[in-house]
Image (cartoon, rainbow, N blue to C red):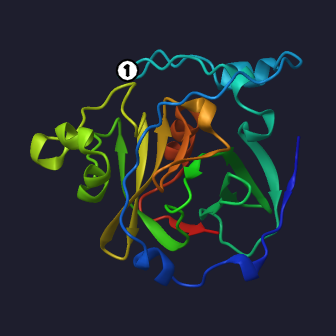
């Protein structure tokens, strides 16, 4: 299935002033699971394989229950007629999609979960660092809001990688110039939150999708958040 993505330039925030001006927030997990989606036709074998178990990982990843993720958020190749250069990551916060722009007017599109009200961010940035099975260290601002996270503070060594780690299997660290914004594009064990505003500002993806994106995106790739 092929769809069109033609971004409206008036929606874009030129430069990165808005990204710099926001309060710093980390990536956190949510404890409220969403109800199972209504019954629908069996998902195709292609998607069942795409989101099946990944046993070869450091922490073997279980299959995604695709009945809990709307089909429109499954990974797929789409047409792209925007002005961004191939290799650019474009996050459309209104539609809950992340596009990796490719050659020949196409893009790989992924469904994402985004920040709750009060944590949204937008602008231009870059991938400053990449990590496989990252450690999670909540920033001081988040710990002040959620004191129970103190045990994972930087002083305490952070939260070790694993299936329950909020950053999931991979993380792309978003930098503004040489400054770490503390925002991430990352995996998440909570695949049922894709298409929702649930995180503390970061862009979350299904673990199977962040592994795919990670393999395609080199360090210093450009990011545009609409």
Assign the N terminus to one quadrant of the image: top right
Is 125 or 189 nearer to us in this picture? 189
Q: Name the residue at 54% across, 66% down.
A: 223
Q: Position of residue 181 (x, y in %)?
A: 36, 66
Q: Position of residue 13 (x, y in %)?
A: 61, 80
SS of the residue under disc 1: loop
Left or right placement of residue 209 versus residue 30 in this view: right
The number of discs equals 1
Q: Are there few (<14), some (14-19), or many (20+) residues within 10 Å of tag 1? A: some
Assign the C terminus to one quadrant of the image: bottom right
The residue where tag 1 is placed is 59
Q: Position of residue 17 (x, y in %)?
A: 47, 84
Left or right placement of residue 134 versus residue 53 in this view: left
Q: Name the residue at 43% across, 17% down.
A: 60
Give the quarter of the image for residue 111: top right
Q: Residue furthest left?
A: 155
Is the residue 54 above or below the residue 108 in the image?
Answer: above
Q: Position of residue 188 (x, y in %)?
A: 49, 35
Left or right placement of residue 126 versus residue 35 in this view: left
Is 56 or 224 nearer to us in this picture? 224
Give the quarter of the image for residue 165: top left
Is the residue 193 above or below the residue 43 in the image?
Answer: below
Q: Name the residue at 81% across, 20% down.
A: 43
Q: Name the residue at 25% across, 54% down.
A: 144
């Amino acid at each position: 299935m092929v769809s069109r993505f033609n971004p409206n330039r008036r929606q874009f925030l030129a430069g990165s002033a808005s990204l710099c001006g926001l309060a710093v927030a980390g990536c956190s997990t949510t404890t409220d699971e969403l109800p199972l989606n209504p019954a629908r036709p069996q998902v195709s074998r292609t998607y069942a394989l795409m989101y099946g178990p990944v046993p070869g990982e450091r922490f073997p990843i279980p299959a995604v229950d695709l009945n809990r993720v709307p089909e429109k958020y499954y990974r797929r190749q789409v047409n792209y007629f925007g002005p961004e250069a191939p290799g650019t990551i474009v996050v459309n916060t209104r539609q809950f999609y992340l596009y990796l722009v490719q050659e020949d007017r196409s893009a790989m599109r992924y469904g994402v979960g985004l920040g709750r009200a009060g944590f949204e961010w937008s602008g231009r940035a870059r991938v400053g660092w990449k990590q496989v099975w990252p450690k999670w260290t909540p920033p001081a601002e988040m710990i002040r809001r959620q004191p129970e996270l103190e045990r994972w503070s930087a002083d305490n060594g952070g939260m070790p990688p694993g299936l329950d780690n909020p950053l999931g299997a991979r993380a792309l660290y978003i930098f503004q110039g040489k400054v770490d914004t503390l925002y991430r594009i990352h995996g998440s064990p909570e695949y049922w939150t894709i298409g929702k505003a649930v995180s503390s500002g970061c862009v979350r993806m299904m673990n199977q999708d962040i592994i795919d994106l990670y393999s395609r995106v080199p360090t210093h790739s450009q990011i545009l958040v609409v």
